[in-house]
Image (spheres, rainbow, N blue to C red):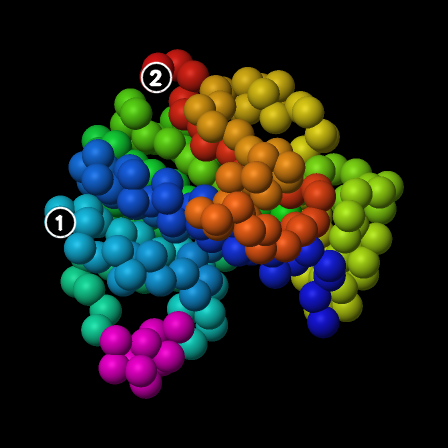
């Protein structure tokens, strides 16, 4: 069972990250790191745009193995520029893990952190952003989605909030991290980043859930945002 607005949110989020991915690889970004890749297929769906771009997909081994198995079962070739890197985000050192996999700190990199931040600890969020801030080349960017902190505290009254917390907890994936509504700029500033693009729930709906005829796909839940940011000292 899903909470109301979940499917609509994931649809909007997917379209947002698809657009960002295509835009950045067309600008000849040479590395893309998927932090918690899951069953993401962008590197296969948009292989035509990748040329010399190296892809690192990070996730837990169980998910990665299942994904590889499904790709093989459906006779989908895995491009040579994709590296599957097993990791436990709450335990492993991100820098050591990526460097061991061949990550190049001198190349401009796109970090896609989709559907992950809300399930990890505050310390993991800090460590991840610290790694990106301190280890990557000028012009590198990080894009992630996040929930309002009120959802974590069970205080949120926006559409879908009352149901979603109980749904994810019942699934064994309790929400653990959020950012206060309207405080993304302050949050990023504290971590050493500046926002490039930010979409509130209303803005996500407006941008990604209407088709060219103006038809509305459906209402997404009202407490999730997406943001693209860069290291403020490297602007």
Local SS, label 2: helix
In the rendered image, the vertical position of residue 107 relative to residue 145, given as above or below: above
Q: Residues within 10 Å of mark 1 (few under 14, many from 20)?
A: few
Give the left or right position of residue 125, taking residue 159 as reference. Answer: left
| Residue 42 % position (x, y) | 33, 57
Give the left or right position of residue 170, taking residue 140 as reference. Answer: right
User: Which residue matches tag 2?
Assistant: 234
Q: Residue furthest front?
A: 213
Look at the image and tell me in which quarter the N terminus lies.
bottom right
| Residue 183 % position (x, y) | 67, 23
Residue at point 24%, 42% (across, down):
25
> Which labelled disc corresponds to residue 74?
none
Give the left or right position of residue 60, taking residue 100 as reference. Answer: right
Is 75 one of the magenta-colored residues? yes
Q: Which residues are magenta?
A: 67-76
User: Which residue matches tag 1?
Assistant: 51
């Amino acid at each position: 069972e899903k909470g109301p607005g979940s499917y609509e949110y994931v649809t909007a989020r997917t379209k947002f990250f698809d657009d960002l991915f295509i835009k950045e690889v067309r600008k000849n970004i040479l590395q893309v790191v998927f932090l918690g890749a899951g069953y993401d297929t962008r590197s296969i769906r948009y292989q035509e745009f990748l040329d010399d771009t190296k892809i690192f997909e990070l996730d837990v081994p169980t998910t990665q193995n299942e994904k590889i198995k499904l790709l093989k079962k459906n006779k989908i070739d895995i491009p040579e520029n994709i590296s599957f890197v097993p990791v436990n985000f709450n335990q492993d050192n991100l820098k050591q893990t990526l460097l061991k996999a061949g990550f190049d700190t001198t190349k401009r990199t796109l970090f896609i952190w989709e559907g992950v931040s809300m399930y990890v600890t505050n310390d993991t969020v800090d460590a991840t952003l610290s790694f990106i801030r301190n280890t990557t080349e000028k012009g590198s960017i990080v894009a992630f989605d996040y929930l309002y902190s009120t959802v974590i505290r069970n205080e949120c009254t926006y559409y879908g909030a009352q149901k979603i917390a109980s749904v994810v907890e019942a699934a064994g994936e309790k929400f653990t991290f959020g950012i206060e509504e309207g405080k993304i700029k302050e949050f990023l500033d504290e971590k050493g980043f500046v926002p490039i693009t930010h979409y509130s729930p209303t803005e996500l709906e407006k941008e990604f859930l209407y088709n060219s005829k103006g038809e509305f796909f459906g209402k997404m839940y009202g407490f999730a945002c997406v943001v693209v940011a860069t290291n403020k000292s490297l602007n």
